[in-house]
Amino acid sequence: MASMLNAPPNCISVQPQKPTLLPGTATSRGLGATRSINLKQRLPSPAVNKMMIPKMSISALPLDNPTKSNNKFDIPIMVNGCNGKMGKAIISAAESAGLDVVPVSFGSAQESGQTVQVGTKEILVHGPSQRESILESLLVKYPNLIVVDFTVPSAVNDNAELYCRVGVPFVMGTTGGDRDRLYKAVEDSKVYAVISPQMGKQVVAFLATMEIMAEQFPGAFSGYSLQVMESHQASKLDTSGTAKAVISCFQKLGVSFDMDQIQLIRDPQQQLEMVGVPEEHLSGHAFHMYHLTSPDLTVSFEFQHNVCGRSIYAEGTVDAVIFLAKKVHSKADKRIYDMRDVLREGNMR
C-alpha cells in the first residue's frame, strides 16, 4: 500500500488497513497494561515522509513558495508579538494575502523600542507602557484596524480587555486565561472578535467531525482502550488543548481515559528517534496520535494529525481576519466568533 505521505500535503485520506497492535512496553507514567506509543517501532523508515500514516491523517507542511494572492483587501492589521515565530509567519501570510500590516506591534518591556524587519516591513515594537494611547492613535489613523494576538496565557485577559476598552476588533489564538472573564469582557464591550485555541482550519474541521460523531453515535467505542501521544516543541509546557478536545469526544463515544494518561513528548531526541519529527521542525511542530483497541485486541483504529511549522495556523489566522473584517463591515449582530464560524462561512483562500 502506498504511503499516505506520498500524497500532497494538507490532505485527508481514509484508508482500510489491517489492525496493528502497539508494542506492549509500559509507559513512564506507570500505567500498568497501558502501552506507550512509539511510532519508530512501527515504521519502516525514520523519515517522516515515509511514515505509514494510519487510517485517518491530516498532515500539513509549510509551502516553500506560497502563491501570492491577487486579491487586495483594505484591511490594516496589527500583529502583536512580531518578534516571535508565530508573529512572523502571520505577517508573511498577511502580506501574501494583500493585507496591510501596520508598522507597529506590542511586545515585552525588553523589546520596547526595537525595530524589527519582517518581510518587507519595518515594525516598531512598544512595551507595556502607553499601550492604550498608542492603540487609540492607531485606530484613528486606521479606522478598519484589526489586531492579531497570539499571546502567552498570563496576558490573555489584560490584552483582550485593552482591545475592548479601545474598541478595536481582534483575532486571538490562545488556550489560556480566564475564559469566562475573557468572553464577558468582549460581550460587554460589543467588540467584534474571533477567539479560538486552534487556528489551523483543517485541524478545526477534523475536531468538528469528531464532535459530530460523538454526538450522533454515543457509546460506539464502549470498552475500547485508548492511547494518546502528542509531541510539540520543547517550549510548549502544557498539554495540547486540541488533544484534550479530541479525547473528550472519545469519552463521549464510550472510551474510559484520563487526561493524565496522555503521553507528552517534549524531548527533542525522543521526537527525532521515536516520533519521527523532521529535525528542521523540532522547534515548531504538532504531532498527535490516537490509538483505539478493542477489548479482545482484534480491532484497532488510529487517528493522526501531524503539523510541521506554523503556516497552517498563519493561513487560518489570515482567513479569520478577513472573515472578521466582513462581519464588522456588515454590522453583524453576532460579535464573538470562533474558527468554526470562519469555516462555515466558506470562501477561504
Image (cartoon, helix red, strand yellow):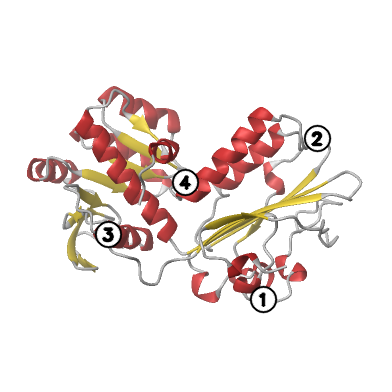
Residue 322 percent across, percent down from the top left = 28, 44
- Residue type, mark 4 in image: Gln
Q: Which residue is mark 2?
A: 222
- Residue type, mark 2 in image: Ser
Q: Which residue is mark 4?
A: 198
In the image as oriented, which residue stretches furthest toward the right?
296
Report the residue at 69% width, 66% height from top: 52
- Horizontal side of 335 relative to 132 (left or right) equals right
Report the residue at 29% width, 34% height from top: 161
Q: CA distance from mark 3 to mark 2?
A: 47 Å
Q: Which residue is mark 1?
A: 46
Determine whether the residue tagged by mark 3 lies in a helix, strand or loop.
Answer: loop
Residue 181: quarter of image: top left
Q: Which of disc 2 and disc 4 is earlier in sequence?
A: 4
Q: Which of disc 2 and disc 3 is earlier in sequence?
A: 3
Nearest the camera: 112 or 301?
301
Q: Which of disc 3 and disc 1 is earlier in sequence?
A: 1
Residue 150 percent across, percent down from the top left = 36, 50
Other-residue count near label 3 (Cα within 10 Å), few / some / many at <14 / 14–19 / ≥20: few
- Horizontal side of 200 relative to 53 (left or right) equals left
Determine whether the residue tagged by mark 4 lies in a helix, strand or loop.
Answer: loop
Task: Judge whether 107 appears above or below 330 on screen.
Answer: below
Q: Which of disc 3 and disc 4 is earlier in sequence?
A: 3
Residue 283 percent across, percent down from the top left = 48, 68
